[in-house]
Amino acid sequence: MTRFLLRRILFGVLVLWLVATTVFLLFFAGPADSVARRLAGPRAPIEVINQIKDTLGLNRPLWEQYVSFLGNLLHGDLGISFISQTPVTTLIVQSLPGTLWLVAGSAVLWMTAGITGGVISATRPRGLRDRVTTVLVLAGISVPTFILGMLMIYLALSVFPWFGLGPGPYISPLVDFRGFLQVMIMPWVCLAVVQAAVYVRLTRGSMLDTLGEDYIRTARAKGAPEHRIIYRHGLRAALTPVITQFGVDIGTLLGGVVVTESVFGLQGLGQLMIRSVRDGDLPVIIGAAILAAAFIVIANILVDVAYSFLDPRVRLA
Amino acid sequence: MTSEEVTGPRGQVGPGAAAGTALARPVAGASVGSVVPSRWRIVFGRFAGSWGGRFGGLLLLGLFLLAFVGPVLVPWSYLDKDFLAFLQEPTGAHWFGTTQTGGDVFALTLRGMQKSLLIGLLVAVVSTAVAAVVGAFAGYYLGWTDWVLGWVTDLLLVLPAFLVIAVLSPALGQGAWLALVVLLAAFMWMVTSKVVRGMTISIREREYVRAAQFMGVPGYKIIFRHVIPNMASLLIVDATVNVSAAILTETSLSYFGFGVQAPDVSLGGLIADGARTAVYAPWTFWFAAGLLVLLILAVNLIGDALRDAFDPTSNRGRR
Amino acid sequence: MTVLEVRDLAVRFGETQAVQGVGFEVARGEVLGIVGESGSGKSVSVLAVLGLLPPRAVVSGSVRLHGRELLGAQEKELTALRGKSMAMVFQDPLAGLTPVHRVGDQVAEAVRVHQRVSSKAARLRAVELLDLVGIPDPARRARAFPHEFSGGMRQRVMIAMAIANDPDVLICDEPTTALDVTVQAQILDVLRTARRETGAAVVLVTHDIGVVAGIADRVLVMRSGQVVETATVDDLFYRPRSPFTRTLLDAVPRIHDHPARSGYSGRPVLPPQPAPAHPGDARSTPPVPAHSGEARSAPPVQVGWGAVRRGGRAVLEVEGLVKRYGRGGWVVDRVSFDVRAGETLGLVGESGCGKTTLLMEILALGAPQGGRVVVFGRDTAGLSGRERLGLRRDLQVVFQDPMASLDPRMTVHDIVAEPLRAHGLPIDRVGGLLRLVGLEAEHAARYPQDFSGGQRQRIAIARALALEPRLLVLDEPVSALDVSIRAEVVELLLELKARLGLSYLFVAHDLAVVRRIADRVAVMYSGRIVEIGPVEDVFAEPRHPYTRALLAAVPVPDPVRERARSRLLLSGDPPGDHLLRPAGPPSGCRFRTRCPLYPGLPSVLGSRCVSEEPELGAADGAACHHSSGGIG
């Protein structure tokens, strides 16, 4: 197990390095002039361009820039934001809690709804509950998050204003718990709706597959009561693909739950990314990209480990 | 043997099973009159019979017609500006009203739909094709090929797609939506290719592949003749799912101002602009949003119906 | 005293009637065998007894357990009875055990569902049960997961679960079909133990009529969803009344008789061309002896041509062939044999002995990891691509699973034409090839799923013959077919060999089939050949203890002989399961851990088995230090 972990971590580091290199090449490869111009924007005056060249040391040979780039990275120094002149790390740390809370809270909601819905519809396929669920699922995956979000805001502001729900930047629960809830509830629900639909479908499919297996028939022949069959034998075996998908999703979302954050103005990591791309704030972009990649790599490793616990047939080679 | 009996014999058992026997036992000297419906016809039959397939298909057809034939019906193009009508509600002259700058919402919305449809279809086809080839080759040859392809796949999976596309899209220049298609497709094929690879690994153990190998058929021919066609149902369903995913991604990008660039129009951009004026000029928002939802709904319905048509006993719930 | 009584049982799936008018009874301690081919409705019937059919099945009739009617009873009542008064053992133990729970927990669950005991007590009882069914080191093994067990062990676990609560009725649905023949003998023994311990009425469903001969008291024969005959086991085998039973018994090959007196009486299956073609074999009609129908008018084909042309040049020589995967054990460990022109070499062995790997190595026509392969006088090492392609024309293969060996997306025509296209030959031969194997040229437009298993195998044979090969490698070509169809395909192969002058390398685990078709036979165990020789000699006087055990384990469809046979049970499992494979084979003779002779040997002789690996003597012989020793 430890050998497996070491190998995967090594692999992960390697991948991150590749990501960093790719990002670097994407932005810094090319003659210094065009790079600076690209960073400064199409209408920047020549002095700004020169300033950029100096600050970033674009006149140095590429490999030298690369080495210092990597060096800085390893020190946790992601540079200074062009726009706000604050260290990128600080910016990221500031915006992280919003994203983390959003994903965590939403995850609780959608997993509960998704798995429950999936089990309910799988135990009586093609029954009424199944059909209703199918329709709900279809609705859930067909409405883009930003439309749903805007709909919710509209409703919250005009139809249910007394709840005090509304879009706004993230507030720490330690500072103002009520405000925290007011700000977070809608994004939680909004994100959870779409995700839950996907998970209902996933759980349903996995459960149906599992319930068709021979060992379910064996359990029934043993005289086990129905609920035991469904949960201890069926769901337990069916959860494996669901959990692994969950892990992958968390990793991806942490790195980019852009739309929900933007619609609700949460000032999380996603919004930071959008702003930095719009502003051409290169250091922030690079930092965010690497962080997002790191989330995904870590999530993948955790998923592999979890998978081996869930399914004893999988040996961690 | 046992489970086959339990799930229902295929019409070969029982004294009165003459109907089934005709298929199972071609009698000597009998004419080939009883034509076996080809598999595609069976699938299409199931698809057309399901309410999801019918509704989704009709809806999509309708939207297609609207998007491509609609603009012919009005004198305005998406570029025109009517300086006499700013932010006007829907009238006879402007069926969907006008925007703040005098653009005809009808023309703009349809133009956006055209883009979404085209991009969605192209991206889905390209990414599924790439996924099929990459996955099949990786799974068939294994060894070095698999290792290299696996690395490329994993790397692309880790790169934050949204960010990269967002950063690159201004550099694409105006009207280069084809390049956007390439970018979108480049980030969408990986998950499918892993599934394809897994299926290839199990298919290549099948005896008809081994038989072909021992006949002397070269590897690449085996892949295109035996492996990929046997995954046709998976690939088709996947392509359909990718259409909606592509449309969603493109729309999201355009919503933020990335993706499709001015002066070209995207539904996402329209929605973003319309959101600001939605409260007092709802036509600037709701037409675009509504049509977008209908589009995605139609594609999803078709995808579900296709999945069931190919394999009515399967209940896979992949996203 | 009748425990279970079934009357007029009928099961319908939508439009199709799967089972009709089935009735039987079983008394305490009695074994009822239910025999039938695939599709006969035997499994559906017993599943209906337990109420385990899917909801869309419509069941009618009467099923009484201790006089109490089960059909139509409340699900709660049935759940209380299942696992307690009635228990079931299924066919596929790997699929039948929940993969994510430990084995001991699953057996304990069977106990706790019906008895109020603490979990600790249940676990102890589980270990007891595992011990009862013969699982070694049961306390430790109880903590293992199903995939860590071999097939035979898993089936023992299933039996343990079934007898956990002392059921009154034990139903076994094809419990040994998925197992090797030596393991099958072990499991049948476990079932006998189970019956003794619980005194239950046993219903044993199987397609293998030989299995029934040794263990059943009464037998029921089913076909097309109906009961064809019910009789005591002796009556059924010696005085069968129904013609279907008779044909079923005829189709079972007997390995202990002289071939001329064996079940296959050499009736011709093909008329000589260009007489009208043979009707395709059907699934739901009885296996028709080939005489009936059109073949009557044509003169019978002479049998025994194969014997005329034996000997001569070797078409395939294998010397010291070796193969291993990665750093694992040697799957093929110095195997040597040859196949001479015009002869059939049968290769037998159980799962994991390496015979499939051996075939794949030969067919790959590449440089082996060790040893030599010489095909038609050419060494396979150092062949160029073109030479290899040329050799492939002479060396073709027929696989086991007729469903998996034909691409379901291609028409029959394209399937048979594929090798021709790959070698640039004219494809007008396809029609003739189909007729050669007894099909119609018009069948070429259809797809494989339109044909029965036996017909698909004929298509596979047609494809293999397309390039006019000289050597045909057949990997268990009839194992997946029903017994009656098996006979026809074997006869077809024999005739083709005689008519076309082919040589066969025929791999099988079914000894009786090998007996019928092979001239010489090689027995493989754990990657080595342990005995080789002319088939009559090896079968009549096997010299290696493994061969003896194999022959002893094959059920003979003759109740008196079966009951009288001494049980030569091998301990342990075939060395097939890679998950359980220890670091390597045992030192010296790798069979000694299971050898029935070894424990009885005095240490001076036994030590040789530990230290020295036995080799095959000359071209024929047995790889055993004590092969000429007495029967153990």
Image (cartoon, rainbow, N blue to C red):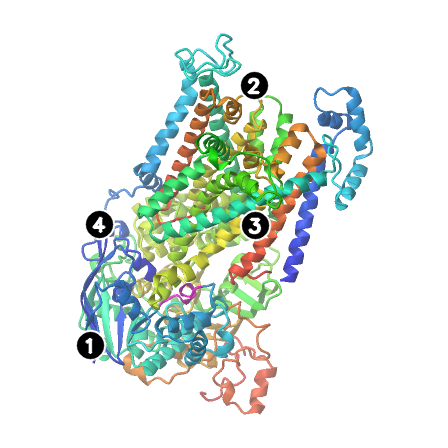
Which numbered marker is on residue B231?
none
Residue C552 located left or right of residue B269: left
Residue C26, percent across and down? 23, 76
Mark closer to the observer (3, 1): 3
Distance between mark 3 and mark 4 Cα atoms: 44 Å
Residue B104 located left or right of residue C47: right
Location of mark 4 (residue):
B19
Do circles 2 and 4 both sit on a common chain? yes
Instruction: Output the chain of dot 4.
Output: B
User: What's the magenta region?
Assistant: C90-98
Q: Residue A46 lies in magenta, yes or no?
A: no
Which numbered marker is on residue B141?
3
Q: Nearer the viewer, residue C507 or A250?
A: A250
Which numbered marker is on residue C239?
1
Q: Secondary structure at mark 4?
A: helix
Residue A80 located left or right of residue C527: right
Mark 3–mark 1 CB contact (< 8 Å): no
Q: For the residue marked with disc 1, what is the amino acid?
A: Arg
Do circles 3 and 2 both sit on a common chain? yes
The quadrant of the image that shows the C terminus of chain C is bottom left
Compared with residue A116, is residue B252 higher up or lower down, i.e. above or below? Answer: above
